[in-house]
Image (cartoon, helix red, strand yellow):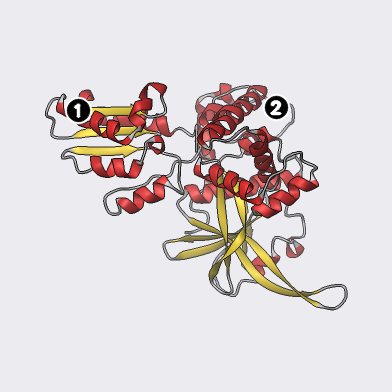
Amino acid sequence: MPRCGKSYVLFKLFYEALLAEGVPADAIIRLDLGLTEHDRLRSALPLIAFVKAHLQHKPAYSWHYLLIDEVQLAERAALVLNSLQILEGLDIYVTGRDPRGLTTHTITEFRGRSEELKLYPVSFPEYLQLCEEHPELVPAHDRPGDKRELLLRDYLTYGALPQVLLTEQIRDKSALLQTLLKEQCLNALKERGRLNGTRKLKQVLMVAAQSVGQLLNPLRIKELLRESHSAAALSVNTIKQYLELLEQEGWLIQVARYNLKRRHLTGSPFKYYFEDTGLCHALGGLAQNEQGLAALLENAVYLELCRRGYQVQVGVLPHRSMNSAGRRIHEGLEIDFVVNSVGRQCYVQTVWDIGGDTEHSPARQPLLGTDDYYPRFIVSADPLRVGQDSLGINYLSLMKFLTQPQCLGL
């Protein structure tokens, strides 16, 4: 997603690593297509000509390195990369933020000849390390509590973008998130999507923020906008366009549902999670009550599962029950996450407060409906709720889940 540090990784960390390995500085071509002065190079032919001319006028090193930031801005990017990769002695590294379009196309085009590295915002262990090394970054809190638990609450609320974590004051974090929402999200999407304004887009985004962890589709969003007496008159197709744009630019992630009985993916509706929970705070979408915090916890768990490289889907268990009139009704029990990794699988359910009576917890029921022996976990905010119950369900605190990568045993 934007502002998660990919430019810093490419142009600072990776560039310095190349220099440390003895690569001459003039054998490295650095090109940021997000800069105004490089507008001309967003066209395919000028970009190819620029790289070729650079190689011709540089010393004849055995190998050159091309680093391109914001490659999704290039016209016919996959075609450009295909033309450049055949040049002898040229190694290419690019960053982009169009996971459903450019990246998929590029990986398919260069299958066996390329690798993709998904970059996420800062992990919670990295944030803890940062606060240990720079105590001045630890926000001051009026409420008492364990320092790590307070940092975890801030991490959920204000997100994990590097620029936000490096901001000391809480009020400055909120102000920065508002600026990022306006400039990096809404205005940027208005420009790239050629929209007339940002008001309607923001309303769709606010519905998504208020519905983290709930099932959504364009029709449902339209109904929610109508129920809130929103002034925006949006068609289903327009809402669909906005959702696709938010996904393409790396702000939202659409997660499919998987029918655990019939072993297949189901269609709409889907769940949507934010690439960073700080955007929910900027939108004012989730209240700081148990329901809002539970949604933030679920979003954070999903991002951490993805950060660890797991394949993640929402689990659905068909279920029959009796209504008050004695009639059978068909409904689906939901398991928050079905997690797969190299032939291994587990189920993860999330809840903010599991309560004192775990045997009657609503979070437990869907896990009991699985007819296999894959490990089952419930992640909650309770730091003391750990261990395993008599039916084999494992309980993890959010702190343990975020700080111990092997806790799921995958």
Q: Position of residue 279 (x, y in %)?
A: 62, 36
The percent position of residue 359, horizontal first and vertical second, equals 74, 65
**Disc 2 element:** loop
Q: Which mark is residue 340?
A: none
Which residue carries the number 1 mark? 53
Helix or strand or loop: what does disc 1 sit on?
Answer: helix
Q: Amino acid at mark 1?
A: Ala
Give the quarter of the image for residue 362.
bottom right
Instruction: Please name whichever residue, 198 or 323, is drawn nearer the observer in this view of the structure.
Output: 198
**Residue 345 against residue 232 in the figure, above or below:** below
Residue at image position (38%, 29%) is: 33
Label 2 environment density (alpha carbons within 10 Å; few <14, some 14–19, many ≥20): few
Residue under numbered circle 2: 141
Q: Residue at x 63, y 26 (%)?
A: 139
Q: CA distance from mark 1 to mark 2?
A: 56 Å
Residue 363 appears in the picture as rendered:
yes
The mark tally for this picture is: 2
Quadrant position of residue 206: top right
Q: Residue at x 64, y 27 (%)?
A: 178
* Side (left or right) of 393 relative to 326: left
> Amino acid under label 2?
His
Is residue 352 something that shows in the picture? no
